[in-house]
Image (spheres, rainbow, N blue to C red):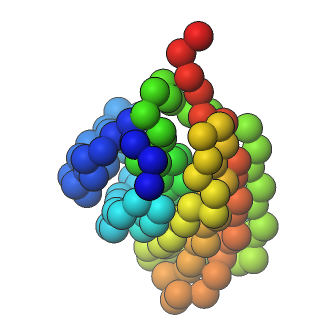
Amino acid sequence: MPELLHPELPTLDDLNALGEGKLPGLIGVRFTHVERGLIRSELSVRPELLAPNGFLHAASIVALADTSCGYGTRLLLPAGASGFTTIELKSNHLGTALDGTITCEARAVHAGRTTQVWDAEVHSPQGRPMALFRCTQAVLYPR
């Protein structure tokens, strides 16, 4: 593995603290597993995360998946990188949830020097696939 910008693996508490006061913390994303190339997270469904039709808002699902992939990207940044930014994301929504806790598993597909590609699956409280998500991240370097 190449030299990494963040060689120390953060704890779950460290990851959860990063989102405090930011979107992940505001919507309630919680990390449950961390290793390089694999992140698991969860989100409790509550009324504020629903669309006016009463179903879980697609943006809530995307926020969980994108946050999980983004935190994973951060852990695989090569030494010398200054950060990353999303250049593309796609989601296919297969179902929804009205209550309970949804879960996400994000995996690195490609972790290169200039781009990373991550896939995530979001599952319903009953364990059924709710959404398939893929994002591409551009690795940034100081100019």
Q: Which residue is more in the foreground, 17 or 33? A: 33
Residue 136: tell me if it is visible.
Answer: yes
Is residue 40 depicted above or below 18 in this figure?
below
Q: Position of residue 133 (x, y in %)?
A: 69, 63
Is residue 128 depicted above or below 33 in this figure?
below
Q: Which residue is more in the foreground, 82 or 88? A: 82
Residue depicted at x 56% and y 22%: 141
Residue depicted at x 49% and y 29%: 81
Residue depicted at x 65% and y 37%: 114
Q: Position of residue 1 (x, y in %)?
A: 44, 55
Quadrant of residue 121 within the rendered picture: bottom right
Is residue 141 depicted above or below 138 in this figure?
above
Figure quadrant of the C terminus? top right
Q: Is residue 43 left or right of residue 15?
A: right
Q: Which residue is more in the foreground, 48 or 105? A: 105
Is residue 43 depicted above or below 84 in this figure?
below
Residue depicted at x 77% and y 55%: 90
Q: Position of residue 8 (x, y in %)?
A: 25, 47
Residue that sits furthest to the top in the current view: 143
Quadrant of residue 131 within the rendered picture: bottom right
Q: How many marks?
A: 0
Q: Position of residue 75 (x, y in %)?
A: 41, 48
Residue 60: tell me if it is visible.
Answer: no
